[in-house]
Image (cartoon, grey):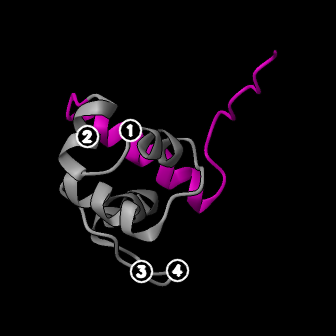
């Protein structure tokens, strides 16, 4: 069976979120199993979340909380503090 080749850069909000979850877990040097135990969700759910699969909102919140984050909705065109350096760097 041939696997699909992963896209070079995430193109949707779901794919960006999945990539961020995976990167954050790896930065914290956590295995999926350890994160599953900390968050109280199944390891398979973490795999689904990290591959942009279907995950319930409760599971997503528990996963984010276990990584030290919270899930927040914001308008898509809102500038966030972390983006300010990039915005002003482009003006130079």
Between the C-alphas of marks 1 and 4, the distance is 34 Å
Q: Is residue 26 visible?
A: no
Is residue 6 shown in magenta?
yes
Q: Which type of secondary structure does the marked residue at label 4 adopt?
A: loop
In the rendered image, residue 7, in percent from the top left (x then y), is placed at 69, 35
Q: Badge 3, how many Cα within 10 Å: few under 14, some, many 20+?
A: few
When asked about the image quadrant of residue 78, the answer is bottom left
Q: Are marks 1 and 2 in contact (CB under 8 Å)?
A: yes
| Residue at the spot of label 1 | 43
Mark 3 or mark 1: which comes first in sequence?
1
Mark 2 or mark 4: which comes first in sequence?
2
In the rendered image, residue 62, in percent from the top left (x then y), is placed at 28, 61
| Residue at the spot of label 2 | 35
Q: Residue at point 37% right, 69% down?
A: 58
Q: Which type of secondary structure does the marked residue at label 2 adopt?
A: helix
Mark 1 or mark 2: which comes first in sequence?
2
Magenta extent: 1-30
| Residue at the spot of label 4 | 77
Residue farthest to the top?
A: 1
Q: Of circles 2 and 4, which is in front?
A: 2
| Residue at the spot of label 3 | 73
Q: Is residue 63 visible?
A: yes
Between the C-alphas of marks 2 and 4, the distance is 32 Å
For residue 25, above or below residue 45:
above
Q: Which type of secondary structure does the marked residue at label 1 adopt?
A: helix
């Amino acid at each position: 069976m041939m696997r699909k080749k992963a896209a070079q850069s995430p193109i949707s909000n779901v794919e960006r979120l999945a990539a961020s979850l995976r990167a954050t877990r790896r930065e914290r040097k956590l295995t999926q199993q350890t994160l599953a135990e900390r968050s109280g969700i199944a390891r398979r759910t973490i795999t689904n979340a990290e591959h942009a699969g279907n995950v319930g909102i409760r599971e997503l919140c528990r996963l984010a909380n276990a990584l030290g984050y919270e899930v927040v909705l914001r308008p898509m065109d809102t500038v966030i503090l972390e983006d300010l350096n990039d915005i002003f760097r482009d003006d130079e």
